[in-house]
């Protein structure tokens, strides 16, 4: 049975999250997996057939490309869908092969990664929260307050920095901790919307796979927009 992993600190709200339910029926908007690509590369310049397939259709598309005689690692293209919440005046992209559940543990939405093989018993995830704010807290004071309020086993602050996302100022907080013997890496993005809402995006993963999903998480945060200011 796949046990989800969400032991997060919601710094501004002052609470610790609890696991996402493992019942797949609770996950809304099931989506298909990202198409896979198979390429055969010859030792000289040649024509190569690329076939793509989707788990939700029975059609097969083929195209021909030319590859130079070199060893190349190709990164599969990631397909993103758009999630929006009119109630919280926000929208953002998320990977098409991720699922999500809304309004779990006071979140707007929680996105969860697909299972990576039968031995993958945890769910890396991104929690999205929102709360009102009066003033923007400077990063220097934020660093100190984070160290004072965090109550996690072996908590270690790695980085606190200022960020700007689509014209909105904010902060990035990277930290590690342990839970039930597992080393966890986490990054919290806080974005101060011009509508006086603080939006938080908290990604947590086992330290060994943290970097695997980080580029997708960063793309999700970059795509964030406030829809009503």
Image (tube, rainbow, N blue to C red):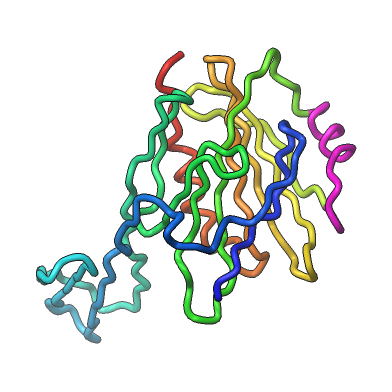
For the point 63% across and 20% down, which residue is it? 132
Q: How many marks?
A: 0
> Along the horizontal axis of the image, is 150 left or right of 92?
right
Q: Quarter-wise, where is residue 85 in the image?
A: top left
- Residue range (magenta): 140-155
Task: Judge whether 71 appears above or below 153 on screen.
Answer: below
For the point 19% across and 70% down, which residue is it? 52
- Can residue 141 be found in the magenta stretch? yes
* Frontmost residue, 25 versus 60: 25
Q: Quarter-wise, where is residue 97 in the image?
A: bottom left
Task: Judge whether 14 appears above or below 66 on screen.
Answer: above
Residue 170 position in % (x across, y down) = 62, 28
* Frontmost residue, 21 versus 69: 21
For the point 49% across and 62% down, which residue is it? 23
> Along the horizontal axis of the image, is 134 left or right of 103?
right
Q: Residue furthest toward the bottom? A: 43
Instruction: Assign the magenta stretch its main secondary structure.
Output: helix
Q: Tell me the quarter of the image containing the N terminus.
A: bottom right
Residue 201 position in % (x across, y down) = 58, 40
Task: Judge whether 79 appears above or below 46 on screen.
Answer: above
For the point 85% across and 32% down, which residue is it? 145
Residue 25 position in % (x across, y down) = 42, 59
Task: Judge whether 140 appears above or below 213 on screen.
Answer: above
Q: Quarter-wise, where is residue 4 in the image?
A: bottom right
Residue 74 position in % (x across, y down) = 34, 69
- Can residue 40 be found in the magenta stretch? no
Q: Residue furthest toward the right? A: 148
């Amino acid at each position: 049975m796949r046990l989800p992993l969400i032991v997060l600190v919601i710094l501004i709200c002052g609470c610790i999250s609890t696991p996402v339910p493992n019942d797949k029926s609770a996950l809304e908007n099931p989506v298909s997996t990202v198409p896979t690509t198979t390429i055969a590369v010859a030792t000289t310049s040649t024509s190569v057939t690329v076939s793509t397939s989707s788990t939700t259709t029975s059609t097969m598309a083929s195209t021909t490309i030319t590859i130079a005689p070199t060893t190349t690692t190709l990164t599969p293209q990631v397909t993103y869908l758009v999630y929006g919440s009119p109630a919280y005046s926000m929208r953002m992209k998320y990977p098409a092969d991720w699922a999500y559940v809304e309004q779990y543990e006071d979140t707007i939405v929680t996105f969860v990664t697909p299972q990576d093989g039968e031995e993958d018993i945890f769910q890396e995830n991104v929690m999205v929260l929102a709360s009102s704010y009066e003033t923007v807290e400077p990063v220097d004071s934020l660093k100190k307050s984070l160290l004072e309020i965090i109550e996690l086993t072996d908590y270690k602050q790695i980085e606190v920095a200022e960020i700007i996302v689509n014209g909105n100022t904010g902060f990035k907080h990277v930290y590690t901790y342990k839970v039930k013997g597992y080393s966890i890496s986490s990054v919290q993005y806080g974005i101060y919307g011009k509508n006086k809402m603080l939006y938080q995006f908290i990604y947590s993963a086992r330290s060994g796979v943290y970097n695997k999903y980080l580029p997708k998480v960063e793309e999700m945060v970059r795509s964030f927009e406030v829809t009503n200011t």
